[in-house]
Amino acid sequence: MSAPTCETPATIDADVGIVGAGPGGMAAALRIAEAGLSVVILDEGSRPGGQIFRQLPDGFVHANPPAEPPSHDAGHDLLHAISGATVRIEQRATVWDATPPRGDEPGRLWFEQGSASRLLRCKAIVLAPGALDRCVPFPGWTLPGVITAGAAQVMVRGYGIKPGARAVVAGSGPLLLPTVTALASAGVKVVAALEAAPRIAALRALPGVLRSGARLREAMFYARQLWRTGVTLQFSHAVFAAEGDGCVQRAVIGKLDREGNPIRSSAKSIDVDVVCTGYGLVPSIEIGQRLGCKAVWNEARGGWHIEALSFGATNVERVFAVGEIAGIGGSEVAIAEGHATGAMVAGILQQRPVLSALRDRATSVRRAADAMLRAFVVPKGVFSLAGDDTIVCRCEDVSAACVRDAARLHGDSLRAIKMGCRAGMGPCQGRMCTPNVQAIATRGSCQQWDEPVAQVPLKPVRTQTILSAPTK
Ligand SMILES: Cc1cc2nc3c(=O)[nH]c(=O)nc-3n(C[C@H](O)[C@H](O)[C@H](O)COP(=O)(O)OP(=O)(O)OC[C@H]3O[C@@H](n4cnc5c(N)ncnc54)[C@H](O)[C@@H]3O)c2cc1C
């Protein structure tokens, strides 16, 4: 693994460049390296593993490591294999711009690493940048002490940090269970665990769980863990508000109706110092869009995602997409797609056939994940939790009232709302707020919201990085 030094060349060349050292990117890299091709992974984290197989940073020690679910066995295998493979991993490398390969012209991935501005040139690109947590705004969600479900896991699993003493976990989807159990294992008292979907969602998800042995083992592991914590999941419930003087001291929780609208008469206050909220994940598609890849809409897969056809191929020649960027699906999907795509990329560059069994496995685990996640589509009514003065775009301090006014005056397209009230124009370029801006503007009713537009830099980097970027 490389750390930038004075001798590090500004431009590096490889057969294949991969964005993301999570399960998808690592699996693809292994297949490509096995075929004898040179492969470089660029990853902004400090160690490989991605979100789910996150490794403690150097120097950190877990005093009380949480129990590992069965899915982590695959993570250990991948990390072990990659450490012995001829795969070059550039860590703390943030990709901020990209162009696709064209004819004899290589594809280009510009990245910032430390204070250096660098460029990777390659014959093919595999995109595996994962996803972002999805929050739904509610009054008080910007108070210190409100964190995402993913952040809670990163704190507990990734750094061994206990985020507070008493927590409520709320949101929707399969990531709530690991969050509850991770917090409990760190000694946090989980006062309530609230799932916005109705109880029937658990039954609807069952066929998708049963279609995958790995997913079934994972579900049973978390069911056991949950039972040990003594916490009961309350369906059709949500946090209506977080309250406190300068930080979270209380949460107002209550029941939701069938559409997810809050039933205000059911509200009650509980004393907590942490509110963990997570309504699933949103695919990180901006790098794919920048490369010209087609995005498609599927609510169960987290909304807009890059369309990956057979073996991860996109509509752009020699650009591939695996894992969450191609739709939320979990680590089993990311690994299966990584293997299939890695084999295909090697096959294309070496002009030889590829085993269809790899593609068939990827397709089958993806179908099972789709069947499970369809049950946990975010109920539209929860977007009415945001009061008029609730901030929706945190970068530009835009309230729900401003978003609604902008939609009334200028139309409810994303572009019109952005022009009308600056929502999504701050440093995160709408990565965090876009789905909420549209949901609030349209009262959650749009079947298919506007496709967000990717802007360069794709991630916040220093101006000097852009000015000093190698051009060739
Ligand atoms: C916060 C969070 C917590 C999660 N917790 C769980 C859990 O407990 N259990 C579970 O089953 N699933 C969990 N998931 C889902 C799980 O992480 C994914 O299903 C799985 O990791 C997907 O693998 P991937 O390879 O597609 O992406 P990821 O594992 O997300 O890997 C993507 C990698 O790309 C890197 N990256 C992204 N953009 C750039 C860029 N521009 N430049 C350089 N590098 C970049 C990231 O640093 C990351 O290392 C979580 C997801 C998130 C976002």
Image (cartoon, rainbow, N blue to C red):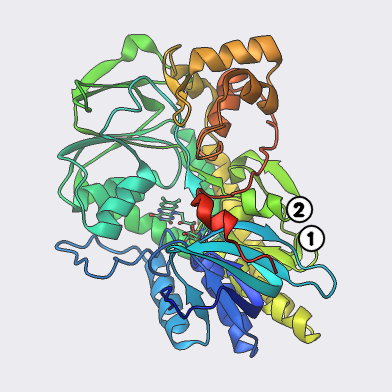
Task: Identify the image quadrant of the N terminus.
Answer: bottom left
Among the 4 quarters of the image, the one containing residue 365: bottom right
Report the Cα–Cα distance between label 1 and label 2. 7 Å
The location of residue 122, given as percent across then percent down, is 68, 74
Q: Which residue appears farthest toward the right when viewing the image?
A: 103
Residue 112 in sight from this viewpoint: yes
The crowd level at tag 1 (other Cα within 10 Å; few <14, some 14-19, many 20+) is: some
Q: Residue at coordinates 46% horizontally, 81% vertically from top-left?
A: 7
Q: Residue at coordinates 19% horizontally, 30% vertically from top-left?
A: 272
Residue 37 versus residue 173: which sits nearer the camera?
A: 37
The crowd level at tag 2 (other Cα within 10 Å; few <14, some 14-19, many 20+) is: some
- Provide the residue designation for mark 1: 316
- Provide the residue designation for mark 2: 292
Badges 1 and 2: C-beta atoms under 8 Å apart? yes
Q: Residue at coordinates 43% horizontally, 13% vertically from top-left?
A: 387
The location of residue 378, given as percent across then percent down, is 52, 33
| Mark 1 Cβ inside 8 Å of ligand 1 | no
Q: Residue at coordinates 60% horizontally, 77% vertically from top-left?
A: 12
Question: Callout 2: helix, strand or loop?
Answer: loop
- What amino acid does circle 1 point to? Val
| Mark 2 Cβ inside 8 Å of ligand 1 | no
Residue 101 versus residue 153: which sits nearer the camera?
A: 101
Question: Callout 1: helix, strand or loop?
Answer: loop
- What amino acid does circle 2 point to? Gly
The location of residue 213, given as percent across then percent down, is 49, 65
